[in-house]
Amino acid sequence: MGRLSVDLCGIELDNPIIPASGTFGFGYEFAELYDINCLGTFSFKGTTLQPRFGNPTPRIAECPAGMLNAVGLQNPGVEQVIVHELPRLKKCFHKPVMANVSGFSISDYVRTCAALDREPQIGWLEVNVSCPNVHGGGMSFGTDPKSAADVTQAVKSVTTKPVILKLSPNVTDIVTIARACADAGADGISLINTLLGMRIDLKTRKPILANTTGGYSGPGIFPVALRMVYQVAHAVSVPVIGMGGVSSAEDVLEMMMAGARAVEIGAANLVDPWACPKIIEALPSVMDRYGIQSLTELR
Amino acid sequence: MNDISMKVLQNRPLTADVRELVLQGDTAAIIRPGQFVNLKLDGCYLRRPISVCDLNADRLTLIYKVVGRGTGLLAEMPAGETLSVLTGLGNGYDLSLAGDAPLLLGGGVGVPPLYLLAKRLIGQGKAVQVVLGFNRKSEVFYEEEFKALGAQVCVTTADGSYGTKGFVTDALPEAYSHVYTCGPEPMLRAVYRKIVTSGSFSFESRMGCGFGACMGCSCKTITGYKRICKDGPVLEKEEIRWED
């Protein structure tokens, strides 16, 4: 094991850096810029059973220290992901990839995960029960412990791949939800998805986002994310992936000191498309500065 | 796409709220007129996309309207400052569609990308006709610059205070081979309805990344979903599907 390598649910990652779903597509745009095989892995664009256009535009708004998005899970649907996206992804990325799955019913989640389970390159299923930008699904499964446990159990029954539940911060007590997922058989927990927010345009006096509300991401949410990662990592025994506003090697180490096994990077990729390779390159010297020999000692 | 550190050489007002920014730095990644760059400004999280107005090997001219906080910060940047610029974004205009007598229709801050386009088309020996539309006389810019390229230029103002009274669609010439246009959406819709040839339309959108990763600026077209930033900003007339 190298000094940056970590184990995520039985699969070794060369480093803990994982571009977060929705900020990295299926990797091609970034593969034009750098060899994406330098990444630990990446979580591909949130995939649903049926194709989705998503929400009307504007879908993006600027915020202090971050951004709002209300994309609404635009994706070609699981069948097209398997037929078109995964073969193309395979050409530029040669490691296990993380599949991000969303749904509007338990049956949606089950059918999508069952289809992706047959794909050899998929290492983990990251089950998103936390999308704040769709109605009648997504986050509604992640804000109630019973629903989150039901999704976990149902998905686990159709796959042998590690199942990681991606949780919403838009809850009163995230520990209860995380425990419910872990008890239902989740192999890992990733958090946090975006914080529900909104902006109003002073000139039009109307919300900037066509969807009215959107998910807040970027450095502004880092302390909230870190606190929740800390709480969850101390409450469950399964590995935790920390995310939310991570933008530097220092942030990565802070997340891991809070208890994260690996770290997802989201909004930072949109502002600096080379953010992840820069962080990976900076990690060893920043570890040196703080006397960290290998990342496994932070566990 | 490249991330280039560029130095501000000049940042001057053209009208009350439209400014011309000249940057120094490598422009090699910009292949076509109609492409854009994405500027990182201190004090803003997301970058700000601005279309390319003119360039040479190490110099880039951008024209922008001060509309919000980002462009407000940009307006205050003095010469000598540097900023991170993602260059060579978007598809740009396809020059091969021009025909012998292309018509360029620009409205307001939609005018700038047509400047480099006119320059390139004239360089290819095309007879370029340009109609530039503004609200009023005080908002007119770049008329002389287009004339200096050798284009035949007509200016319209909505209030009639300068040039032809009306919109660009009120000043279409009798004959043209292809239309290239950029401007506010109501103008693009009017152009779409009125022109009798093929046309290339450049769209504006609120973007997240500017390079196709976030799906923040998706739109529906006849040929499927497209990202304004990566598959656009230029869409051809036959693929446009207007949303109501």
Image (cartoon, coloured by chain):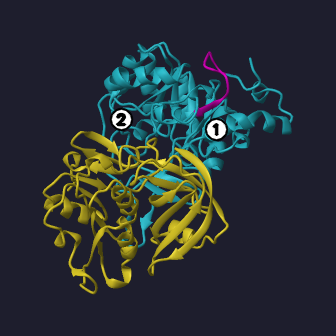
Chain colours: A cyan, B yellow
Res B47 seen here: no
Q: Residue at x 57, y 60 (%)?
A: B44
Residue A3 image point, x, y percent? 77, 24
Residue A286 lies, with reference to residue B193, above or below; the image says above
Comparing B82 with B41, the one in front is B82
Q: Position of residue B18 (x, y in %)?
A: 45, 74
Q: Which residues are magenta?
A: A7-18
Please give the residue where the numbered disc 1 appears in the rendered image.
A229
What residue did someone put label 2 on?
Answer: A75
Residue B134 lies in what quarter of the image?
Answer: bottom left
Q: Is residue B36 left or right of residue A95?
A: left
Left or right of B192 in this view: A160: right
Q: Amino acid at mark 2?
A: Asn
Residue occupying image coordinates x 60% and y 46%: A245
Amino acid found under the numbered disc labelled 1: Val
Q: Is residue A190 left or right of residue B233?
A: right
Near-viewer residue (A165 or B27): B27
* Residue closest to the far bottom: B161
